[in-house]
Image (cartoon, rainbow, N blue to C red):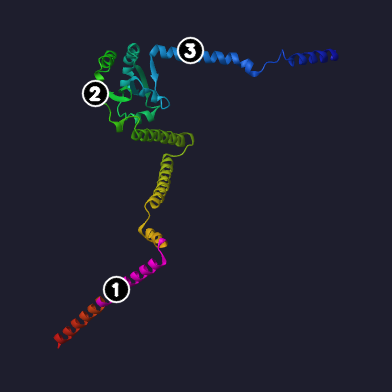
Amino acid sequence: MAQLKTKRSCKLLCQTNSPSCKLSCSQLFQPLLSIILVSSIASSAVAETETGVLTITDANWTVTMDGEWMIKFVAPWCPACAQLKEQWERFSSLAAAMGVSVGEVDVTEQPGLSGRFLVTTLPTIFHVKEGSVRRYVSVREAEEFHAYVSNRRWEEVEPLPSWKSPTSPLMSCMAGLFRLSLWIRLTHGYLTGDLGMPVWGSYLSFAMATLVTGLLMGLVLVLVADCLCPSRQKRKEERGERMSPQNKARMHIHTHTQRQCVISALQRVFVSSRSVCEYGGEEASVGSR
C-alpha cells in the first residue's frame, strides 16, 4: 500500500514537473490582467464620452496651450460649482461639434494650477486660444458658452498680459507657492492628527524650519554677493598684490605722509584748545582779584 502511494506521488510530481504541465505566474495572471486593463480603458472611454469634460492636472495642463479650450476651476465644497456642473456638461456636448475642448480643474487637488492661473474666486472660467488666455465673465449657461465661442465674443475681451500668462516665470513661482501651501497644510494635519503633536508644537516646528531656512538662504546670498561684488578693502588688497614693488613703496610713503598730516593736525587742535583753556583760566583769576 505504501509502495502504491509512493508511485502515485512520484507520478504526480513527474507530471507537474513536465514542460507541458508547467504554468508560470505570468501565464496564469495574464488573462486576468488583460481583462482588468481592457475594462479600465473602456470605463475611462465611457466616462469621457458621456461627459466630454477632460480633467486638467499639473501633469497635463500644457495641452491647454494648444488649440481652443474652455476651462473651469471648481471645488467640491462650492455650491455655485455644483449648480454649474449640469450646464458645463451640456456645453461639452455642444463644443465637440465646434472642435473646442472642455476641461475642468479641481483646485483642492491641483492647487498649483489655481496659482498658475491666479484663481481667487470659484467657479472661474477661462477661454484659451493658442496660448492666449481670457477670463469668461458672462452668463454661466450652456447656450451662452456656445455663443461665446461660435460668435467669437472672446475677441472683445482683453487677454491676460504676458507676465500673468500661465507660462510666465512669475506664474510658475505662484504655482510653486500654492503647492507649498498645500504641503504645509497636509504636513500640519499629519503632525497633529497621525502623530498626535499639539497644535502649538506643529506651529513651533514650522517656525524653526522657517528660521533655519531663512538663515541658510541669507548666508548663501551673502556669499554670492561677496563673490560678485567684493568689498572695498578686499579690492584694495587684491590691487596691492598686483602692484609692483616700486608702486607699493610709493603707496606706503603716501599713506605714511597722510598719517603724519593727520597727526600734526590733531596736535595743532590739541595745542590750540589747551591755550584757549589756559587763557580763560587767567581771565577768571584776574576777574576774581
Judging depth in this view, the residue of 249 and 185 nearest the camera is 249
Element under disc 3: helix
Residue with the mark numbered 2? 157
- The stretch of residues the image draws in magenta is 242-268
In the rendered view, tell whether residue 102 sits above or below residue 204: above
On the image, the x and y values in percent for residue 252 come to: 37, 69
Residue with the mark numbered 1? 261
Which SS type dominates the magenta stretch?
helix
On the image, the x and y values in percent for residue 278 come to: 21, 83
Residue drawn at the location 53% of the way across and 15% of the way down: 37
Residue drawn at the location 16% of the way across and 84% of the way down: 283
Cα gap from disc 2 to disc 1, whole angstroms? 74 Å
Judging depth in this view, the residue of 172 and 105 nearest the camera is 172
User: Contact, CB < 8 Å: mark 1 with mark 3?
Assistant: no
Q: Residues within 10 Å of mark 3 (few under 14, many from 20)?
A: few
| Kind of residue indicated by mark 2 | Val
| Kind of residue indicated by mark 1 | Cys
User: Contact, CB < 8 Å: mark 3 with mark 2?
Assistant: no
Comparing marks 2 and 1, which lies closer to the viewer?
1
Cα gap from disc 1 to disc 3, whole angstroms? 95 Å
Residue with the mark numbered 3? 42
